[in-house]
Image: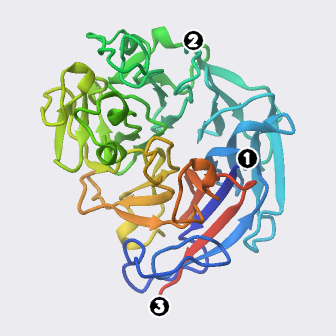
Amino acid sequence: MIKNILAATVVFGGTAVVSAGPAPLGVDESATVNPETGIRLPEGFKATVFADEVGFVRHIVKADNGWLYGALMRPKNRMGLVAMRDTDGDGDADETLYFGNKLRGTGIGIYDGYLYFGTDVSIMRWKLPEEGGVPTEKPELIAHGFIEKRQHAAKSFALDGKGNLFVNVGAPSNACMEKARTKGSPGMNPCPILEDFGGIWRFSATEQNQHQKDAEKYATGVRNAVALDWNPHADGLYLAQHGRDQLAEFFPEHFTVEESAELPAEEFHRVDKGSDIGWPYSYYDHIQGKRMKMPEYGGDGTTESDIGQMPLAGFPGHWAPNDLLFMTSSKAPEPYKHGAFIAFHGSWNRAPMPQQGYRVAFVPMDVAGKVTGKWVTFADGFAGTQEIRSPRDAKHRPMGLAEDQDGSLYISSLMSGGRVWKVSYEAN
């Protein structure tokens, strides 16, 4: 039985934060999961339950006036967006409103007083009331013309704060095979899917009724990047993409079941104009530290590829990165100020091996956007069990990330009805 979806919150800032030194980086592997909150955090961070039963929340965003907005994958009360607020400052969301009749989607963001929302086929926006809450005006259509597909259809996006809107258009394909997900079928070369999918398209954030065919194809070779964000410190677009599936199933002569569970890596990249990440011709092997040729294009697990760029970091396969966030608040604890938070909600494709992911990871970076150390787990325990054979086994699945101006970090998480955690850093 599929459980309902959940939302969660993490807070660094607020009145409780008085920093006496650098916060510890990552969870202590010997620490235990908090029995009340169900999650585990680095030493010095404390979690409380913020809210429950908010619906199938995916990406979220926090407005300066205190409202937290979430995009719903499945409508609740026929509405596709949720707005939550803590009116008395006690740490609990005591006001929850729904809007967006018959909508559903993933991407959400705020720019210049407007709330942006991504359905599978469009990007729209509402003018936000100054006092917050539910928009009263009709939405404006900003971008459309995306070809409707069932696979990798979510339109996540990033806003650079300078009038540009970057939209992920996922490839409705595993590896651009002639016969989709069919053993023995070769990859198409060149891959025709890349004409309309498998990349990032740039639009104006303010112009209405823009069609994808008239927008700029900013980057290509991206299988699906639900997780993307503009890094204001390094002034650039970053993403974490979902790697391809079924290596052992289609190529048992080259990959064991164990290797297929770990490969290919989930890739974390900076994406500049004209970037080619490499899909479907190549993938990143984080174990060998090399970019490899995809088996549909002649690869055998040992042959390197010269197509695509090397990632900034690689994570184990099929963890499914679903959101990315760079914090901007000066109240964030020291090693977390310029790095990247990535929410992994887990995937089905490690089977028959146990599933993994189900955590929020952190990549330490400097102000120039360079990785300065190994990634660490910032929060885990969401799944509620060590043995996950299917995503349905997980109690919680981290999904979206958002930041408050006081340094709070919100995490939306699939499963279990819609809970919200609030986590604060308390100096020793």
Residue at 61% in and 21% down? 122
Q: Residues within 10 Å of mark 3 (few under 14, many from 20)?
A: few
Residue at 48% in and 31% down? 163
Q: Is residue 404 visible?
A: no
Q: Which mark is residue 1?
A: 1
Q: Is residue 352 visible?
A: yes
Q: Amino acid at mark 2?
A: Gly
User: Please, what secondary structure does the residue beneath circle 2 have?
Assistant: loop
Residue most toward the right?
77
Q: Is residue 401 left or right of residue 189?
A: right
Q: Point out residue 180 in the picture as x, y percentages from the top left corner.
A: 43, 17
Residue labelled with disc 3? 428
Q: Is residue 110 above or below residue 170?
A: below
Q: Is residue 120 left or right of residue 360?
A: right
Q: Nearer the viewer, residue 59 or 285?
A: 285
Q: Residues within 10 Å of mark 1 (few under 14, many from 20)?
A: few
Q: Which mark is residue 145?
A: 2
Q: Nearer the viewer, mark 2 or mark 1?
A: 1
Q: Is residue 397 above or below residue 265?
A: below
User: Please, what secondary structure does the residue beneath circle 3 have?
Assistant: loop
Q: Amino acid at mark 1?
A: Met
Residue at 72% in and 71% down? 91
Which circle's residue, 2 or 1, is located before the other in the chain? 1
Q: How is the image coloured?
A: rainbow
Q: Point out residue 298 in the picture as x, y percentages from the top left corner.
A: 18, 21
Which circle's residue, 1 or 3, is located before the other in the chain? 1
